[in-house]
Image: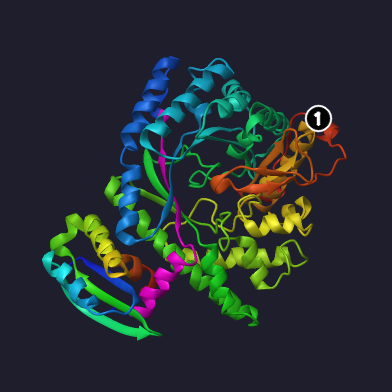
Amino acid sequence: MSKAIITVVGKDTVGIIARVCTFLADNQINILDISQTIVQGYFNMMMIVDITAADGRFGVLAEEIEKLGDEIGVKIKCQKEEIFTSMHRI
Amino acid sequence: MLNMFEVIETNNMIEQEKLDVRTITMGISLLDCCDSDLGAVNEKIYKKITALAKNLVSTGESIEREFGIPIVNKRISVTPIALVGGAACRTPEDFVTIAQTLDRAAKEVGVNFIGGYSALVSKGMTAADENLIRSIPQALACTERVCSSVNVGSTKTGINMDAVNLMGEVVRQTAEATKEKDSLGCAKLVVFCNAPDDNPFMAGAFHGVTEADAIINVGVSGPGVVKVALEKARGQNFEVLCETIKKTAFKITRVGQLVAQEASKRLGVPFGIIDLSLAPTPAVGDSVAEILEEIGLERVGAPGTTAALAMLNDQVKKGGVMASSYVGGLSGAFIPVSEDQGMIDAVTLGALTIEKLEAMTCVCSVGLDMIAIPGDTPATTIAGIIADEAAIGMVNQKTTAVRVIPVIGKSVGDTVEFGGLLGYAPVMPVNTWSCEKFVTRGGRIPAPIHSFKN
């Protein structure tokens, strides 16, 4: 399985999770884990998703989801999991 | 499973602390491009580089996008051209045509620098080596992306003082040949002792003859990350300080290892080494000098600087070595003046001198790097500076280098702007007492006694 981490940071507003999830569903990306908190009014979310079905188009998807973030007014990043596991796991 | 704090920590390093992979450098052997016909050599070189490296930049960009980590430079290093062109080139001008071919190939594949316009003359010079060295001023003046290096000494062979003396002249001639651009040519010319075969960093990168046909070497960076980590260890003792540096270096290097493996897999070229260097840029917060100041120096150059740098360099290596399967290149802290805002400030304030920088090079990875000196500095004085650095490298069994820029028409008090990653530099005073009779004696300095280990 090929995994990616999506992070969403920004001012809290209605429907952030809904719009991100809709985008992922439209692209056959399954969500494996979500954690979310609000720190001082700022929305922080991390999702671990399965991108096996979308692996060939990963670069394009990462750009599209970033654009979606611009529309909602939050910062969204989608990165392959290995950058985090290589740094934090021995 | 990963937690949010780990993810945020990594992304903060990238977004706020300027963590990046400084360079993916593809080493390409040009030994199979040798020919007695100059036209044929040029054609083979162009074809080989453009074939092997055609996807280097796009692959780097896709790794950048997928992992969300900036990869600042994509570069190429090649076999020292004195070896490749030796059979075909009869004059320095012949070698210049190869420099132009390298420049053209670099532009075709989109890399910003190509290194390896080099000669390895630590014991003696062949006619080809000498022709190449004499062609350097012209080659660097008529090309944009070619970088040149000359290895003039090693622990095993001693120092070739004829080459040192010649390089003093060549550095000056390069400065003259590029004087319209503030002698920028000298920023692309490094004189080494104990030059590594697998260094991915410019301007000193070349692809050694002991290397495979093609290889991927990666240089990581991250002075900003180390500085921010150390802010949290303020007032703590050396044990805590060292642990913090090691852990941070480990994390930085792991990112480099990941990028190197991905690039190697996607390009179908074997992975060579990770160079664990702290390479600063002129951006604020991306400075080795700032780390030293965070460790406790009022300004870099103050007493204690050499000790602090020795400790930093060692801890970076200790943390990095475990994070990568193969470590090589220069691996340590870089202390270029023009590329590090903290160093520039320290020079401007009078805290940092060339003599202190020379002491610092005894304990860190490179040497006198990106230092602007007065334009009227004699060639023999530059040769003396090179000889001093080479002696430090030779005796301490480490790489040392000199990349000084005698800026034609400028003197102490002036500032030189190189632009981009090369930054800007105040012109530093050089000791004006002569060493002419010393550097012009001719011959070589024998290898030190501790090199006889067989």
- In percent of width and height, residue A63 lies at 27, 58
The chain under label 1 reads: B
Residue drawn at point x = 34 percent, y = 43 percent: B56
- In percent of width and height, residue B287 lies at 59, 60
Q: Which residues are magenta?
A: B4-31
Which colour assignment does the render follow?
rainbow
Determine whether the residue tagged by mark 1 lies in a helix, strand or loop.
loop
Q: Is residue B279 rendered magenta in the image?
A: no
In this rendering, position of residue B282 left or right of residue A89: right
In this rendering, position of residue B279 left or right of residue A8: right
Residue B289 in sight here: yes
- In percent of width and height, residue B222 lies at 51, 62
Identify the residue position indicated by label 1 in the image.
Answer: B441
Q: Quadrant of the N terminus of chain B?
A: bottom left
Task: Indicate the amino acid at tag 1.
Answer: Arg
Residue drawn at point x = 18 percent, y = 76 percent: A18
Relative to B197, does residue A86 appear above or below in the rendering? Answer: below
- In percent of width and height, residue B37 lies at 43, 14
| Residue toward you, B178 or B365 | B178
| Residue toward you, B258 or B153 | B258
Q: Is residue B13 rendered magenta in the image?
A: yes
Determine the image quadrant of residue A13: bottom left
Q: Residues within 10 Å of mark 1 (few under 14, many from 20)?
A: few
Determine the image quadrant of residue B141: top right
